[in-house]
Each structure stands twice: as C-alpha cells, then as structure tokens.
Image (cartoon, coloured by chain):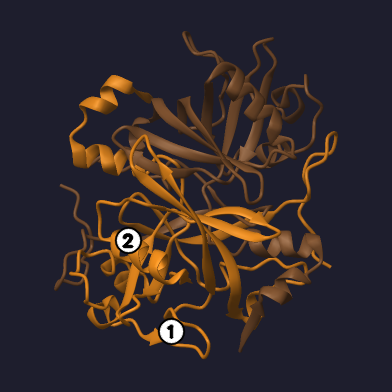
Chain colours: A orange, B brown
Amino acid sequence: MALVFNSNDIAMMDQRYRATFINSLGGFKSVCMIGTRSRAGVSNLAVFNSFVHLGANPPLFGLVFRPDTVERHTLDNILETRVFTVNHLTEENYVPAHQSSAKYPKGVSEFAETGLTEELQPGMFPPFVLESKVKIAATFVQKIDIEINKTILVLAKIKQVMLPDDVLRTDGFIDLQAAGTVTCSGLDAYYTAHLLERLSYARPGFMPQPHVVS
Amino acid sequence: MALVFNSNDIAMMDQRYRATFINSLGGFKSVCMIGTRSRAGVSNLAVFNSFVHLGANPPLFGLVFRPDTVERHTLDNILETRVFTVNHLTEENYVPAHQSSAKYPKGVSEFAETGLTEELQPGMFPPFVLESKVKIAATFVQKIDIEINKTILVLAKIKQVMLPDDVLRTDGFIDLQAAGTVTCSGLDAYYTAHLLERLSYARPGFMPQPHVVS
C-alpha cells in the first residue's frame, strides 16, 4: 500500500521526524569530509552530504551550508582562506567522519577529537584526511545566498585530485566501489554501493546496453 | 600508489574523459526521473543526478540544469507550469530511466519511447512514473543562474510524497534500500546500496553508536 503525505501532513510533523523524513527522501547522497584551516592555523573537519556536480570544464561543484550549525566553522574558514579539501568516506572511516559533525567549539580540531589523521601536503594550506582514498583540493569561487531558507551555496573549483591507481578506468571513470567510497541517506545512515552495471550512452531508438570500456 | 592530477592535468584531458572523470569524482549521487508536462500537454521525462537537499522546514530541494542539453525540455516545462514530479530509480526501472536521457525531439514523450508508464493523479498536472516506488510532487520556487558555467539551479518545494508503507520507519526515516532505490556514479553507472549502519547523533566526547529506533 502507498502512503501519501501532502504539504499539510509534512508541516504538521514533529520537527525531528520531519528532518529525518525530508533528508532521506531525495535518494542516496554523496557524503564527504570537508577539511579547512583557519588563518590562525586551527584545522577543522566536517561531514557534508550536499556535494553537487556543476560542470566538468571548468571542473566545478557546489556545497550547501546551513549557517546555524557547526558547519559554520567550515564556511568561515573557506571564506577566510579560499581553499579546502574534500575527502571521501570509506567503510573504515565513516564512524569518525560522522563524529566530526558534533558541535565542537571553535578552536577545537576535529582531527584530534575523532582520531582521524591530518595530512598536510607541500604547497597545500588546508588539511586532507590521511584515511581517505579519494581526495580533492578545491578553491572557493562564489557564495550564493539562498534567501528562502537562509542556506548558502558555495561554488568551488577542483584544483587537485588524488586517488588510488587501481580505481581509475581507461575512459576516466573512477570506480568508487573499488575505492571503498560509501554513500549515505538521511542524517545518519551509511551504505556501501554495489554495481548493477554501467550503461551505454543513451540515443533515441536504441535501448541502453552494458557499457564497454576498451 | 596514489595518482595525482592537478588543474593543468585536468584541463589537458580529452573532453569525454574529463566529463567521465569529474562526474564520478564527487561520490555516489542521488538519481531520479523528473516528470513534467508542457502547457500543450506533452509529457516529458528525464533522468537527473543533481538532486540536493536544501532544508526540511519548509521542505526544499535543488536541481541543477545544464541549458545546452536535453534537460532543457524539462526546464522549459517547469518554468511554464511551475510543477513537476521526482521519481526514484529502482533495480527494475533504471535501464529505461537511463534511456530517458537520450536527445528526443521536443514534442516526443519519453514515456512512450522508454516503455515507462505515465501515471496521472487527480489534481496533479505533471506525470509520475508508475514503476517508481518513492515519488514526490514539487512546485517551482526560484531559478538561480550560475554565471560561471551557465548552469541553472532550480529551487523547489515538496508538495506531496508517496512511498510504500513498509519503508517508513517510526522516526521518519525512509529505508531507501527496502524501497529498492538505486544510486549512481558518473554518467552511466548504477548501484544498489547496502546498509552498514545508522549512527547515533554525534555529540562531543561520545563516539557514535548504532542508532536505535524505538
């Protein structure tokens, strides 16, 4: 049987129930740790599930920030320094990654608190997560204020990508299952992903076939 | 061994290679079919992997559109009629869903071409996908032009949610694995998701525990 919820049903939900419901409604989500460092040198790490691809050339993505939460430290650091890192979650690090969403006071490094290892690279100001396999260094491009609910969309450009050599396929596809990348749903559920198949490029008149990588 | 790609390496990639590479870089993505109908009554269906949660109260999400592609028909219809549907992909319908991304001419319904079944509901103008289990009716809120690469972010409000009664947990969590919802990576790879665990709300000083639903 199908359950149906209209606008009024949603408006009448208990606040926590609604947050869980709406957050799990849109499907499985990209989840990553954003690493930043303040000008004063304090490292910060926070888990995000709002990474959205915007374009490949130039390589751009977006991140959504809620200004009333712990994520604010991340946003402050990005606006201050214009640089940050994106680090994938894996089966090995999703528990400390989730912990990085706790409301630590400003000035406390989530690396120290969660047990994740801060990885500093020559010429890179913000910290990476040593335990992550797929890592991106990014620079701030633009901040867009979404007036209707005071969220903030940050646009960023990809400056450097690091990944294990055994997960890159010959056509540029990154095999995230081989990389151990996990996905999430809602506010607290973590999942591994298992390939059904890659499909061929869709053209009118031909149903998709399994994608063949030469 | 880790591979490292800097800005110049990415800029020098073959265009298709780069599109595949950058599209699979951000982690597993939400994937859904957007159902619309033009004022003239022509139904349209297109697959999107850019659904992003924006807030629960009011229930808002975003979708990214690339104006130079087939998605344009979807955007035209949304701007014309202000309403659309979001339909989850499952193991049973991801192949025809992928096919809906083929460049059909305007005036052709992807329902007819892909074999998916158009579901019209009383009082709802845009079509749903009968074969989907989790479905959302949404209304247009705002269009934000992202100047740097001419993409368009559409903000929308959730007006109605339909889901099977056996996937809703007592705390509002929608069990997408039980609903058969699939996730995607890159431009053409589809995956099932398998729960590792739900974690407790993160608080400083306490490492996350398995989430207990009463």
Q: Position of residue B28 (x, y in %)?
A: 53, 57
In the picture, measured across the screen, residue B57 lies left or right of residue B191, that is left
Which chain is home to disc 2? B
CB-based contact (under 8 Å), mark 2 and mark 1: no
Q: Nearer the viewer, residue A61 or B209?
A: A61
| Residue in the image at 64% along x and 83% along y | B3
The quadrant of the picture occupied by the N terminus of chain A is top left
- Quadrant in which residue B80 is drawn: top right
Note whether A149 is above or below B160 in the view shown: below
Numbered badge on residue A130: 1
Q: Nearer the viewer, residue B136 or A40?
A: A40
Numbered badge on residue B84: none
Note whether B84 is above or below B71 in the view shown: above
User: Which element carries disc 2, helix, strand or loop?
Assistant: strand
* Pointer 1 local density, CA inside 10 Å: few below 14, some 14–19, many at least 20: few
Whether residue B116 is visible: no
In the picture, measured across the screen, residue A208 lies left or right of residue A125, that is right
Which amino acid type corresponds to the residue marked 2 in the rendered image?
Glu
Q: Could you give the CA–CA distance between mark 2 and mark 1, rounded to whole angstroms?
A: 23 Å
* Pointer 2 local density, CA inside 10 Å: few below 14, some 14–19, many at least 20: some
In the picture, measured across the screen, residue B167 lies left or right of residue B214, that is right
- Quadrant in which residue A22 is drawn: top left
Q: Nearer the viewer, residue A195 or B155?
A: B155
In the picture, measured across the screen, residue B17 lies left or right of residue A126, that is right
Whether residue A197 is visible: yes
Of circles 2 and 1, the one toward us is 1
| Residue in the image at 26% along x and 37% along y | A18
Q: Which residue is mark 2?
A: B197
Q: Position of residue B117 (x, y in %)?
A: 63, 23
Which amino acid type corresponds to the residue marked 1 in the rendered image?
Leu
Q: Looking at the picture, do discs 2 and 1 lie on one chain?
A: no
